[in-house]
Amino acid sequence: MIEGTGPALAFWGLSALTLVSAGGVIVSRNLFHAVLFLVLAFIGIAGFFLLLSAEFLAMAQIVIYVGAIAVLMLYAIVLTPRAGRDNRETWMAVPALFVAVGLAAVLLFAIHDTDWAKSARAYVLSAGELGRELLGTWVLPFQLASVLLTAALVGAVMLVRSPEEERKEEEE
Amino acid sequence: MSVTLEHFLTVSALLFTLGLFIALSKRNAVGVLMGVELMLNASNLALLAFARLTEGPAQIAGPVFVVFVITVAAAEVAVALALAVSVYRVRETIDVDRITLLRM
């Protein structure tokens, strides 16, 4: 439990920001506007991370999601000029709505029905502790993640090479 | 006034279902990817809320897992957008309804 009026106000403000921006991604008809709403939602999540006193993760969220992933999405839209910039739904919208509402109902019931093992004293994470854990207990997953990231980025570069470049390399 | 674990989990669940709806229903491949990113963010929020507000033997595991989710999300987005661009080169569309090469 996080006590105090300030955190509570911050929580409600951030909830409104995040959920309204996620709704904006659905409603906006222009893909560029959808990406901008997505950026707002990412910033709201970063605010939640700050509220949960994980400053390092909040900064990582801003740098990676807002700085890298959203910009990459904008580039993907710019690189597909004749594909249409509209953001409409397919015929799957109605079944998807039912699935989403059903899942929301199940999740909300589970959340409010479960007796969580709440702690009286909030656990506060420091960035130093996170770093020591990452390079101590979790060093093997950490290394695997770095290999995955390298492989994915090399794969992305290979996938988007233009046909002319490939032909030129074959001639050499 | 106070904020409890249930508040965070409720926001996370709603964000996850919004992301699920976007991922299932959008026509454009980039739009589908936006839904996936929202779902990953919602799970990150739930992980951090659990790490901070519940008792457990290894609460540091929550933030550590968030780091891994962010890493894998970055890798996934790079590959997915590269795939979208290379499909566009061949078909001149990234409309997921019209990419039906593998359909019977």
Image (cartoon, rainbow, N blue to C red):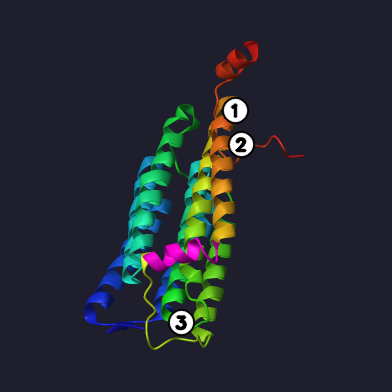
Q: Residue at x 54, y 56 (%)?
A: A142
Q: Residue at x 47, y 55 (%)?
A: B70
- Drawn side of residue A104 relative to residue B45, left or right: right
Find residue B96 and report its horizontal and vertical position in percent.
58, 41
* Chain-order first, disc 3 or disc 2: 3
Q: Residue A45: which quarter of the image? A: bottom left
Q: Which residue is mark 1?
A: B91
Please, is residue B55 above or below residue B37 in the view?
Answer: below
Disc 1 secondary structure class: helix
The numbered dot on residue B98 is 2
C-alpha gap between disc 2 and disc 1: 9 Å
**Residue bounds of the magenta highlight:** A128-138
Dot 2: within a 10 Å radius of its alpha carbon, few (fewer than 14), some, or many (20 or more) residues? few
- One can see residue A43 in this view: yes
The amino acid sitting under disc 2 is Arg
Q: How many numbered circles are shown? A: 3
Specify the quadrant that holds the N terminus of chain A. bottom left
Residue A78 sits inside the magenta stretch: no
Callout 3 and callout 2 share a chain: yes
Q: Nearer the viewer, residue A109 or A148?
A: A148
Find residue B16 and report its horizontal and vertical position in percent.
49, 63
Find residue A121 and report its horizontal and vertical position in percent.
37, 86
Circle 3 or circle 2, nearest the eye: 3
